[in-house]
Image (tube, rainbow, N blue to C red):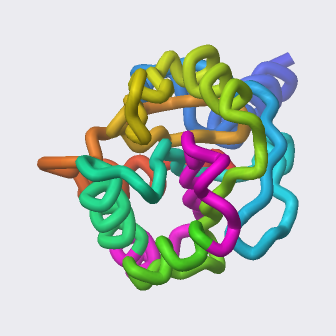
Amino acid sequence: MKKWITACFALLILQGCSSGVNLDEHFSLNGEVTDLQAVNQSEEPFHTDEMEDEIWLAAFIFTNCDTVCMPMTYNMSELQDQLDEQDLDYQFVSFSIDPERDTPDVLQSYGEQFEVNFDNWDFVSGYEQEDVELFANRGFLSPAAQLEGSDQFVHSTSLYLMAGDRILEQYEMSVDVPYEEIVEAVELLQDYY
């Protein structure tokens, strides 16, 4: 009987150790991304379903933006360098909220301005304006809409930390970026994935 109790106790300990990170203890959000099909800057298909087993960081931008998008993308490129220095496995996805203007060629040129590494960063469009608005509004609880009488759009300035289809956290990317906090969060998720 004593051996059986010891074996059960050992099994419980091993299960507790192998269960990975309890995401709810470490992150403040628990949203779920909806389905979206797109094309990236290389005209390759992109589908949110393909991110099921990925740690990824998502943002909403548009290349014609005259306010926050350039600083956000610059800050994301700085973050990409820091994550790469730690040899972490992750993917960036920048969703264009102006898919009519942001063709793959335009997105490619935009990313090149910031010297991003396209190996783990997709700039995506190729969907309808209404689709990306619903995607942002419903899944991310984030605004995404064209300003009336303007070629500008309202959108979130956050970077969203994702694990598969789960939205775990959001970080401000236009000013006072918490680089260290984001790197630590991605490191933590490496144990989970």
Is residue 120 positioned above or below 5 on the image?
Answer: below
Closer to the camera in the image, 126 or 23: 126
Residue 120: where, in percent of width, then height?
62, 71
Residue 130 painted magenta: no
Would you say 177 lies left or right of 115 here? left
Residue 90 painted magenta: yes
- Identify which residue is drawn at 63% across, 40% down: 163
- Furthest residue toward left: 176
Residue 173: where, in percent of width, then height?
28, 47
Screen quadrant of the N terminus? top right
- Identify which residue is drawn at 49% across, 43% down: 60
- Identify which residue is drawn at 66% across, 26% down: 135
Residue 55: where, in percent of width, then height?
62, 51
Please give the range of residues in magenta: 81-105
Residue 25: where, in percent of width, then height?
45, 23
Would you say 107 lies left or right of 60 here? right
Would you say 42 lies left or right of 120 here? right
Is residue 68 positioned above or below 158 on the image?
Answer: below
Closer to the camera in the image, 32 or 18: 32
Is residue 183 positioned above or below 42 on the image?
Answer: above
- Identify which residue is drawn at 57% across, 29% down: 167
